Image (cartoon, grey):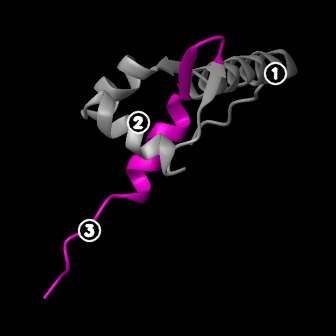
Amino acid sequence: MDLQLVKTKDIREMKDALKEINATNQKLSEEWLSNKEAAMFLRTSTKTLYRYRVKGQLPYARRNSQILFKKSDLVEFMNNRYNKPIEK
């Protein structure tokens, strides 16, 4: 078995690359979708999305007259509604 040394410079480069990947992941999770985009993402109608919003099941933000949803909230909403089959 060969022993290889890792240089400090290489470790710093790997840390920087990981920081960049992490920042990209955070940016993606904070993506905001319009009402129509959110309905398409959830594969539902805008009326159903409206009902979820009015019932307080989906958090949202309002910018001027536009309703916006965080994509990460929509993913969490779907994950909470995921039904696993019952094993017999």
Q: As displayed, is residue 47 above or below residue 16? A: below
Secondary structure beneath disc 2? Answer: helix
How many marks do you count on the picture? 3
If you read the primary sequence from the N terminus, does the residue marked by circle 2 or circle 3 appear first?
A: 2
- Tell me, for residue 18, which label it has, or none: none
Q: Which residue is mark 2?
A: 50
- Mark 1 vs mark 2, CA separation in Å: 55 Å
What amino acid is labelled 2 in the image?
A: Tyr
Secondary structure beneath disc 3? Answer: loop
Residue 3, quarter of picture: top right
Name the residue at 64% across, 22% down: 62
Confirm or deny contact between disc 1 and disc 2 (CB under 8 A): no
Q: Which residue is mark 1?
A: 7
Q: As displayed, is residue 50 above or below residue 81? A: above
- Mark 1 vs mark 3, CA separation in Å: 47 Å
What amino acid is labelled 3 in the image?
A: Lys
Q: Which residue is mark 3?
A: 84
Q: Quadrant of the N terminus?
A: top right
Q: Is residue 71 left or right of residue 3?
A: left
Residue that protrudes farthest toward the top in the picture: 64
Q: Which one is in front, 55 or 77?
A: 55
Crowding at mark 3 (Cα within 10 Å: few <14, some 14-19, many 20+): few
Magenta range: 63-88
If you read the primary sequence from the N terminus, does the residue marked by circle 1 or circle 2 appear first?
A: 1
